[in-house]
């Protein structure tokens, strides 16, 4: 579904744009992803809307068939990249699962602010972004995804999420589409 509107209380969720991840071999240049994420952050802040910065600092328990990252990370690995310009008013969530809602208080924090919609972006499309969008949808939030402000290391995962999953979870558009909708709300 194409992007139609933003609720009056919409929050922006930026997933895993952190120092330990941004140097990964993504399919799209990370600089453009970061630039568009930053443009969204600036627009949400300008309109007094919540900005949520999510980082990952661990993995969920349980066995998997694929080897998993260890629980120990190098110093600074979980730090947000400076381009996000973290501010004291931002909501910060540290997760240990793919999605930002599982095992965190994010739902309660957003509901306490009256948030009814979230815009989700970041990395990686097929894991952190998709899991966060799925969980937001399951928690009753309207979901919007800024497709040009996300990327993945696996082209097939990125494409599958965009073509098959995201249209079932909410509305999609570009970062500029979202910024334009924010501008028309206050015009």
Image (cartoon, rainbow, N blue to C red):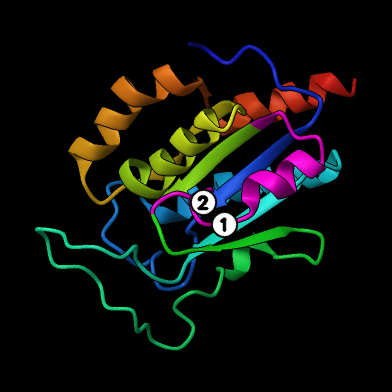
Disc 1 to disc 2: CB gap under 8 Å:
yes
Circle 1 sits in a helix, a strand or a loop, which is it?
loop
- Numbered label attached to residue 100: 2
Reply above or below: 8 against 93: above
Q: Quadrant of residue 143?
A: top right
**Residue at far right of view:** 187
Task: Look at 11% across and 60% down and name the residue there.
Answer: 66
Residue at 85% x, 38% y: name it: 47
Where are the magenta residues, as a range? 98-117
Query: In the image, what residue occupies the spot 63% across and 11% down?
Result: 4
Q: Is residue 45 visible?
A: yes
Label 2 residue SS:
loop
User: Residue at label 1?
Assistant: 104
Q: Which quadrant would residue 79 be assigned to in this image? A: bottom right
Left or right: residue 158 compared with residue 139: left
Q: How crowded is the residue under tag 1: few (<14 C-alpha within 10 Å), some, or many (20+)?
A: some
Q: Is residue 43 visible?
A: no
| Residue at 81% across, 35% down | 114
């Amino acid at each position: 579904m194409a992007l139609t509107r933003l609720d009056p209380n919409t929050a922006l969720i930026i997933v895993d744009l952190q120092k330990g991840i941004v140097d990964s071999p993504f399919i799209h240049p990370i600089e453009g992803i970061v630039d568009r994420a930053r443009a969204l952050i600036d627009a949400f802040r300008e309109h007094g809307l919540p900005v949520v910065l999510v980082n990952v600092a661990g993995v969920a328990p349980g066995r998997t068939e694929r080897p998993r990252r260890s629980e120990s990370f190098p110093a600074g690995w979980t730090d947000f990249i400076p381009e996000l310009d973290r501010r004291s008013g931002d909501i910060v969530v540290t997760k240990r699962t793919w999605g930002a809602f599982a095992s965190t208080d994010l739902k309660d924090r957003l509901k306490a602010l009256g948030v009814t919609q979230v815009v989700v972006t970041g990395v990686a499309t097929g894991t952190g972004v998709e899991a966060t969008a799925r969980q937001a949808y399951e928690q009753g939030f309207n979901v919007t995804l800024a497709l040009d402000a996300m990327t993945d290391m696996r082209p097939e995962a990125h494409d599958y999420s965009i073509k098959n999953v995201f249209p079932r979870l909410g509305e999609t558009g570009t970062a500029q589409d979202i910024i334009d909708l924010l501008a028309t709300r206050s015009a």
